[in-house]
Image (cartoon, rainbow, N blue to C red):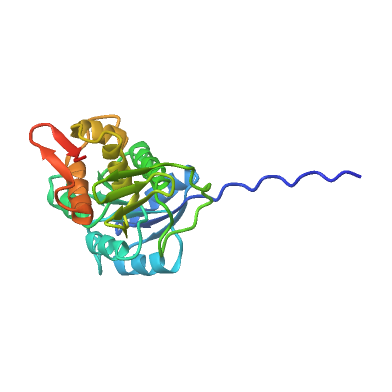
Amino acid sequence: MSSSAPAPASPRPVRVLLVEDDDLMRRSFTVALERYGYQLKATADGLTGLELFRDEGFDLLILDVMLPGLDGIGLCRRVRETSLVPVLMMSARGDGLDVVAGLEAGADDYVVKPVDTYVLVARIRSLLRRATYAPAPGPGRATGDKPPPSEGELLVFGDLAIDTGGMEVFVSGSPVALTPTELKLLLEFAAHPGIVLERHTLLRNVWEYGWDGDSRVVDLCVQRLRRKLGRDRIETVRGFGYKLRR
């Protein structure tokens, strides 16, 4: 009597932590994202969100900027102390202060409320695709069923080395922890060393914006890379964009 092979395991749903203090918005986001197959855990304040992040594994965080107890910017900073999990900030103000503060705190992207569900889902999908560049989940990050890294090459630019197989970065032989967005941005520069890349090109290739996005996300991500890799690594070409020095 022949035995049939076991059915392949279903993929694990993506676990998302939503921290939003507006009850109606929190419920509507939860219902909408669950319809797309995401597994949501939602809370209304930053301190509870921090506890959930530390106690449970999540693949992505969505944080409102204005939160009671611990605001979204402070929560993002606390998360970045231990984890490279993708972070999407939500702000009711798109005029600059919240956006800059959130991106400087380590957020990967942001949306301005009110936001259509299809825009939110598009940003989430883009962040999750970028997360496949990360070498391994950190504390507070769920362990996904990722395939082993493919064989790659070692790219060397002075004392900067990028292992494209293991998706690891080293400066003077010491490993450097990058968020998925920072890593993808660095890989984009490394694929075109010495060539000026315009902001709109980086928005399209790294953030996957199908429209003209906010160039501040590029500028602030470059700033974070400079802090981690050295200020002279990525050169600003005024009026055009950025390039990686050979």
Residue 116 image position (x, y, % from top left): 32, 39
Instruction: Tell me where residue 32 sits by quadrant.
Output: top left
Number of labels in the image equals 0
The quarter in which the C terminus is drawn is: top left
Q: Is residue 173 above or below residue 202?
A: below
Q: Quadrant of residue 67?
A: bottom left
- x%, y% of residue 79? 32, 63
> Does residue 210 sit above or below 145 in this rendering?
above
Front-lying residue, 45 or 59: 59
Quadrant, the N terminus: top right
> At x 28% / y 44%, what residue is drawn?
186
Image coordinates of residue 236 in percent, x first then y, are 12, 40
Q: Looking at this view, name the residue that lies furthest to the front.
A: 158
> Could you say which is closer to the camera, residue 194 or residue 32?
194
Q: Residue at x 33, y 38 (%)?
A: 119
Q: Residue at x 41, y 64 (%)?
A: 140
Q: Is residue 24 visible?
A: no
Q: Is residue 15 visible?
A: yes
Can you name the residue that lies furthest to the left here? 238
Q: Specify whether 183 is left or right of 4.
A: left
x and y percent of residue 163 in the render?
38, 47
Residue 112, quarter of picture: top left
